[in-house]
Image (tube, grey):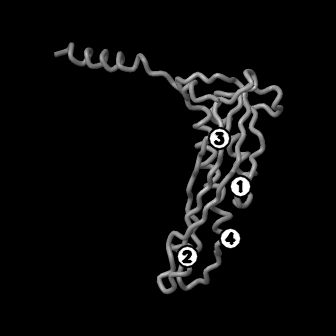
């Protein structure tokens, strides 16, 4: 009976011997330069937000070194915002032409260039993110006047939208991808 607890402890310790912190993927580059984001869409102030948030995502991950000079980088990341969508989510119950919330979508083309070999790791992959913008606070006191208009709600939703897109772009760059996809 005394042997059973020791066997359980030994079995549980042995099960964790192959656990390893961090990502097992090794990247083919050590440093990266992130070019300023280009904005071909009509997303207001998105390029500045996305530029800073993608850098923050790489810094938080810590597997690659961010450099400020493209000539010293092993890889160069190019991001182009290509599409910004705004569509009504929920409508006013009394007037169906008035939207109460909007669904926002942002699409980016991303390319990762290998400076050392002079070719792309990948070219023009798409990443997209969606967020909601609520024109009126559904939890507000109905006796008080509504102060939030669409422009303010869109302005407040933009950091959420770009933060999610930045994380998806960072995941795409830092995830293992087959060498055969490089162009």
In this picture, is 158 found above or below 25?
below
In this picture, is 86 found above or below 140?
above
Q: Residues within 10 Å of mark 4 (few under 14, many from 20)?
A: few
Q: Position of residue 39 (x, y in %)?
A: 74, 53
* Residue at mark 1: 46
Separation of residues labelled 2 and 1 (CA atoms): 23 Å
Q: Position of residue 153 (x, y in %)?
A: 63, 68
Contact (Cβ within 8 Å) of mark 4 with mark 3: no
Instruction: Identify which residue is drawn at 75% across, 49% down.
Output: 38
Q: Position of residue 171 (x, y in %)?
A: 58, 37
The mark nearer the N terminus, 4 or 1, is 1
Q: Nearer the viewer, residue 29 or 151?
A: 29
Closer to the observer: label 3 or label 2?
Answer: 3
Contact (Cβ within 8 Å) of mark 1 with mark 3: no
In-image side of 124 versus 25 (left or right): right
Which mark is drawn over residue 99? 2
Q: Nearer the viewer, residue 15 or 120?
A: 120
Which mark is drawn over residue 151? 4
Contact (Cβ within 8 Å) of mark 2 with mark 1: no
In-image side of 35 versus 88 (left or right): right
Please, which residue is most extreme toward the left here? 1
The mark nearer the N terminus, 4 or 2, is 2
User: Residue 25 appears in which quarter of the rendering?
Assistant: top right
Q: Quadrant of the N terminus?
A: top left
Callout 1: helix, strand or loop? helix
* Residue at mark 3: 124
């Amino acid at each position: 009976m005394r042997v059973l607890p020791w066997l359980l402890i030994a079995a549980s310790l042995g099960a964790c011997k192959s656990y390893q912190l961090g990502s097992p993927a090794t990247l083919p580059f050590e440093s990266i330069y992130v070019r300023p984001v280009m904005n071909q869409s009509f997303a207001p102030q998105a390029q500045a937000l996305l530029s800073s948030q993608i850098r923050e995502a790489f810094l938080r991950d810590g597997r690659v070194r961010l450099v400020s000079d493209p000539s010293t980088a092993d890889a160069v990341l190019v991001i182009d915002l290509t599409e910004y969508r705004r569509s009504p989510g929920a409508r006013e119950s009394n007037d169906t032409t008035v939207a109460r919330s909007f669904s926002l979508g942002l699409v980016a083309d991303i390319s990762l260039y290998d400076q050392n070999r002079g070719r792309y790791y990948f070219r023009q992959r798409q990443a997209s993110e969606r967020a909601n913008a609520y024109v009126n606070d559904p939890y507000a006191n109905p006796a008080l006047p509504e102060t939030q208009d669409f422009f303010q709600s869109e302005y407040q939703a933009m950091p959420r939208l770009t933060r999610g897109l930045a994380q998806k772009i960072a995941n795409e760059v830092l995830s293992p991808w087959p060498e055969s996809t490089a162009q």
